[in-house]
Image: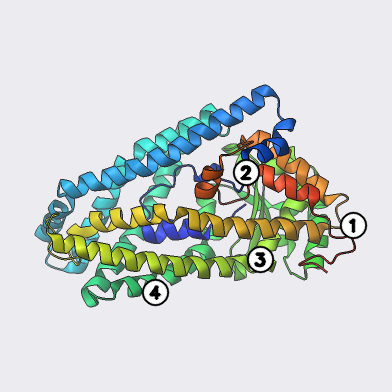
Amino acid sequence: MKLQISAIYRFLVLTFLLIPCVGQAQTQTQAATQVANQEARSHSLTPEQYAKAKSYSRTRYTQYFVGEAYGFVILLLLLLKGFGSRLQKFAERFTSSRVLQVLVFAPLFILTLSVLLLPIDLWDHSVVFKYGLSVQSWGSWFSDWAKAGALSLLLGTILIWILYAVIRRSPRRWWLYFWLASLPLIVLVLFISPVVIDPLFFKFEPLQPKNPELVNEIERVVQRAGLNIPTDRMFVMNASSKYTGLNAFVEGFGSTKRVVVWDTMLQKSTLAETVVVFGHEMGHYVLHHIPKQTAIDSAIVLILLYAGFRIVKSQVRSGRWGISSESELASLPLLLLVFSILGFLATPVFSGISRHFEHEADRYALEVTHGIVPNAGQAGVHFFETSGVTNLADPDPNPFIVFWMFDHPSDPDRIRFMKNYDPWENGHSPRYVK
């Protein structure tokens, strides 16, 4: 499911498009206890499936924490070795213009950091390929890595230019002004992603010719929700060219709002299951999760930026890093290190917020498909059981891992909820769809 505002914030603001979120692809979420989780899903797995899912999950958790630590170490080494200072002097030899210096400094810094972080990216792909979650060749993977790197180069340079422009303009309040400047960039990325960024990596085709029956069922759900999503905004994505997992999402807003179903969903899921999943995605829009989560995450990022401002200022004043002012380009490794650590420590907060919205979208899905999909709850249960096997979801995740990493409820929790949520049976009124 694609509601990742906090990930976008971290990607754009806290790490300037540079530090990878290792393990993000398969994070899901919340569990009450390990025993309850195991009871909720392990019965549907063979011993071999259970062992494979646990092995993959442990590897992904290790990747996440090792990847984060590796990123911190790389930034610390760049700081200790004075890489920023040397690169700043190199840029100053080219031009005395501060604007042009950024255009020399930023791309070289981003390129260097991207190459240094490449081992983590390679490890990530090798793992998903080994466990059969990816069928993407290394040639195709490197092509995507280069495209993502080019985007990082462009957007990262813009962000670095904005950052140092506001630092020089307002040394005391740059954290606030940089936050304000980041907001339209977040909105821009959300807006253009469906039509500019996503097509760089996948092919999108109209859903109607591929599966008219599914479109008809989706239209029934859309009408019940009181939304207007034309059929020309419904697409199927060729995920099977790279992945074996199952997914669907709603993204964009205004003229770029669209429904996207992975072709693997059409191949491996029933019509009822796909409609329930669509109801979940539509719930994010009907319940205004995107603006709500954007606002909440914005407030958290503002707090983190202020905390980072205070820490960076104290570190510069200490003189231990050989940086005389935050306004120097040489301070970038220090800024990135501080904000990356703060972002990492705030991960459970972002994850918990996302889990709440994802859970409410599950509730909405059951309510909006009630009466349209026979036994919608059972369809949801079957989907999470089968997709859990396909996606190698952790059948009994550790509560700490759930708390820290999972941005969706765990499969066991979702299955348990789908089984038990039935307000109609007791004559109660549903929460969202009356």
213 to the left or right of 42: right
Q: What residue would you read off at disc 2?
A: 238
| Callout 2 secondary element | loop
How many angstroms separate mark 3 from mark 4 (CA)? 24 Å
Instruction: Please say if the residues under marks 3 and 2 sit with CB atoms less than 8 Å apart.
Output: no
How many angstroms separate mark 1 from mark 3 (CA)? 27 Å
Q: Residues within 10 Å of mark 1 (few under 14, many from 20)?
A: few
How many angstroms separate mark 3 from mark 2 (CA)? 24 Å
Q: What residue would you read off at disc 3?
A: 285
Q: What residue would you read off at disc 1?
A: 425
Q: Which badge, 3 or 2, comes first in the chain's sequence?
A: 2
Q: Which badge, 2 or 4, comes first in the chain's sequence?
A: 4
Q: Which badge, 3 or 4, comes first in the chain's sequence?
A: 4
Q: Position of residue 16 (x, y in %)?
A: 35, 57
Q: Position of residue 194 (x, y in %)?
A: 56, 58
For badge 3, the amino acid type reads: Tyr
264 to the left or right of 73: right
Instruction: Please say if the residues under marks 1 and 3 sit with CB atoms less than 8 Å apart.
Output: no
Q: Which badge, 1 or 2, comes first in the chain's sequence?
A: 2
For badge 2, the amino acid type reads: Asn
Q: What residue would you read off at disc 4?
A: 180
